[in-house]
C-alpha cells in the first residue's frame, strides 16, 4: 500500500461579513428627455435621440436627417417631444433582493443598452424587499447616467409587495413613480447582516457610528426625493423613526413639516408620520402626498397614461437571468467541491502509484475549475488566493508522484 499524507484539505468558502444595507447614496443631475434639437445660432432643426456615448465633450446622437452624428449639446436647444425616438418601451423587471454583483452589472448593462436604442422611455418594474447599499448605489448611478432617456418606475404587485428599503431608493432615482394598487413604498432604514441575522447599525457599530450612517442616508434620500419634487421630509421619515411629519396648508400651498415648526397661520391637514415607526406608504397614500405620481392598475394602464399603447414592448429580463446564471454557477461550484472532498479521501487510500497519480490529477483539475468559477463569480464569496494556494500544492504533489513513478526501480 502506498502511504502518504496530503498537505492540504478541501477548501471551505470564506463568507466575509457583508452588510445588506437597504438605502443608498447616488449621483444627481439628470437631464430631461430631448428629441428635437435646434441649433442656437443657425436654427438648424434635427429630430432624434441622444445616447450615453460622450467623447471630448460631444454626445453621439441618432438623427433622422443625418443618421448618427456627434453634437456639442451646449450649442443646441433640446425639446422633449419624442420626435425621432423609436416607438418602443424597454421594460426592465427588478424582482427580488438586490444582493448579487452579477445581477447589478446585468441590470446596469441593460439600462445602458436601452438608453442607446432610443426608446420612448425605460420602464423599471420594481418588486423588491431591499438589498446591499453598494449594489443599489450602482443601479441608481446607472439611472442617473441615462441622460436624455426618461426612466419610469412602476411599483407593481408581487411577492414582496412593492418598493421596500433599497427598492424605494431605486424608485426615487427615476423620473416618475407609478404604483399598482395594494403595493407599498418605504421602510428604508439601513440594516446589516451579521452572521445569518439582520441587525440594525446600533448593534453592529454602536450608536455614534450608526447615527452618522443614518444621518447620511436620511439626507441623501431626502435630496433624491426633492430632486423630482417629492417631499424630502417624508423620504427622511422612511429612514429615521424619530422623524414626525405633518402636512399643513398655507396660502393654498401644501407643506410637509415637523410639528414643532408649525405656525399659527398654518392649518394642519394630515399627520403622515409619527415617532416610533419607520414610514411606509400604501400606493394611495404615496400618491396623495406626492411621493408617487399616480396609482395605476396595470402596465397597460400605465402605457395608456403615458400615451405609449402603440409602442412595441421589449422585455429585457437581465436581472433575473443573471440570478439564474449565478445559481447554476453556485450549484456547479458545490458539486465540484463535494467531488474534490471524495477524491482527496480516495487519494489518501490509494494502493498503487498509478491510482495516486490519477487522483492527484483530478484533484488538481478540480481546484483549477473552482478557482476559475471563483474569479468569474465574485458573488460566490470565495477566497481566490486560498484556492490558488491549494491548486499549487496539488500541482506540486502531482509532479512529485509522476517523478516517483518514472524513476522507480
Image: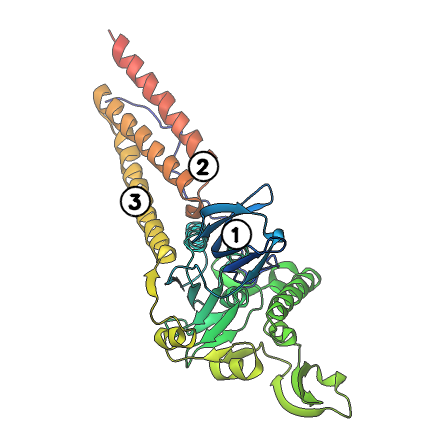
Q: Specify the quadrant of the image occupied by residue 21.
A: bottom right
Q: Residue 134, located in which quarter of the rendered image?
A: bottom right
Q: Which of 323 and 111 is in front in this view?
A: 111
Q: Distance between the residues labelled 1 and 2?
A: 17 Å
On screen, residue 284 versus residue 325, left or right, reads right
Mark 1, residue position = 17
The residue tagged with tag 1: helix, strand or loop? loop
Q: How many marks?
A: 3
- Residue 332, numbered circle: 3
Instruction: Give me the residue at 64% from left, 59% from top.
Output: 205
Q: Where is residue 114 in the image (x, y as percent from the top left)?
A: 42, 55
- Looking at the image, the residue that sits furthest to the front is 42
Which residue is more in the foreground, 260 or 242? 260
Q: In this view, does 383 lie above or below 16?
A: above
Q: In this view, does 325 lie above or below 183?
A: above
User: Which quadrant is the N terminus positioned in?
Assistant: top left
Upstream in sequence: badge 1 or badge 2:
1
Q: Is mark 3 on a helix, strand or loop?
A: helix
Position of residue 85 measured from the top left corner of the image (x, y, whole percent): 43, 59
Amino acid at each position: 500500500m502506498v502511504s502518504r499524507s496530503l498537505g492540504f484539505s478541501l477548501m471551505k468558502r470564506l463568507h466575509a461579513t457583508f452588510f445588506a444595507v437597504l438605502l443608498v447614496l447616488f449621483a444627481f443631475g439628470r437631464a430631461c428627455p430631448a428629441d428635437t434639437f435646434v441649433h442656437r445660432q443657425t436654427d438648424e432643426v434635427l429630430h432624434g435621440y441622444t445616447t450615453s456615448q460622450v467623447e471630448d465633450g460631444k454626445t453621439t446622437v441618432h438623427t433622422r436627417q443625418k443618421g448618427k452624428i456627434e453634437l456639442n449639446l451646449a450649442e443646441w436647444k433640446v425639446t422633449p417631444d419624442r420626435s425621432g425616438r423609436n416607438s418602443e418601451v424597454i421594460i426592465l423587471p427588478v424582482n427580488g433582493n438586490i444582493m448579487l454583483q452579477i445581477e447589478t452589472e446585468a441590470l446596469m448593462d441593460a439600462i445602458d443598452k436601452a438608453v442607446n436604442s432610443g426608446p420612448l422611455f425605460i420602464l423599471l418594474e420594481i418588486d423588491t424587499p431591499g438589498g446591499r447599499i453598494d449594489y443599489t448605489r450602482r443601479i441608481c448611478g446607472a439611472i442617473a447616467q441615462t441622460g436624455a432617456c426618461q426612466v419610469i418606475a412602476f411599483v407593481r404587485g408581487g411577492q414582496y409587495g412593492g418598493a421596500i428599503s433599497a427598492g424605494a431608493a431605486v424608485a426615487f432615482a427615476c423620473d416618475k413613480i407609478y404604483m399598482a394598487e395594494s403595493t407599498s413604498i418605504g421602510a428604508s432604514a439601513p440594516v446589516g447582516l451579521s452572521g445569518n441575522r439582520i441587525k440594525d447599525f446600533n448593534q453592529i457599530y454602536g450608536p455614534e457610528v450608526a447615527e452618522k450612517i443614518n444621518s447620511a442616508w436620511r439626507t441623501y434620500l431626502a435630496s433624491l426625493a426633492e430632486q423630482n419634487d417629492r417631499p424630502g421630509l417624508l423620504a427622511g421619515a422612511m429612514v429615521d423613526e424619530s422623524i414626525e411629519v405633518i402636512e399643513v396648508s398655507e396660502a393654498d400651498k401644501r407643506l410637509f413639516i415637523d410639528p414643532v415648526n408649525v405656525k399659527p397661520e398654518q392649518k394642519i391637514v394630515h399627520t403622515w408620520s409619527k415617532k416610533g415607526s419607520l414610514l411606509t406608504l400604501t400606493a394611495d397614500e404615496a400618491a396623495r402626498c406626492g411621493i408617487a405620481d399616480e396609482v395605476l392598475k396595470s402596465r397597460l394602464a400605465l402605457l395608456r397614461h403615458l400615451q405609449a399603447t402603440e409602442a412595441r414592448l421589449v422585455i429585457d429580463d437581465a436581472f433575473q437571468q443573471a440570478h439564474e446564471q449565478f445559481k447554476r454557477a453556485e450549484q456547479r461550484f458545490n458539486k465540484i467541491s463535494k467531488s474534490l472532498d471524495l477524491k482527496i479521501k480516495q487519494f489518501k487510500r490509494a494502493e498503487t502509484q498509478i491510482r495516486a497519480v490519477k487522483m492527484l490529477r483530478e484533484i488538481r483539475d478540480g481546484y483549477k475549475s473552482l478557482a476559475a468559477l471563483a474569479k468569474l463569480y465574485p458573488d460566490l464569496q470565495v477566497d481566490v488566493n486560498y484556492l490558488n494556494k491549494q491548486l499549487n500544492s496539488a500541482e506540486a504533489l502531482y509532479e512529485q508522484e509522476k517523478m516517483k513513478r518514472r524513476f522507480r526501480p
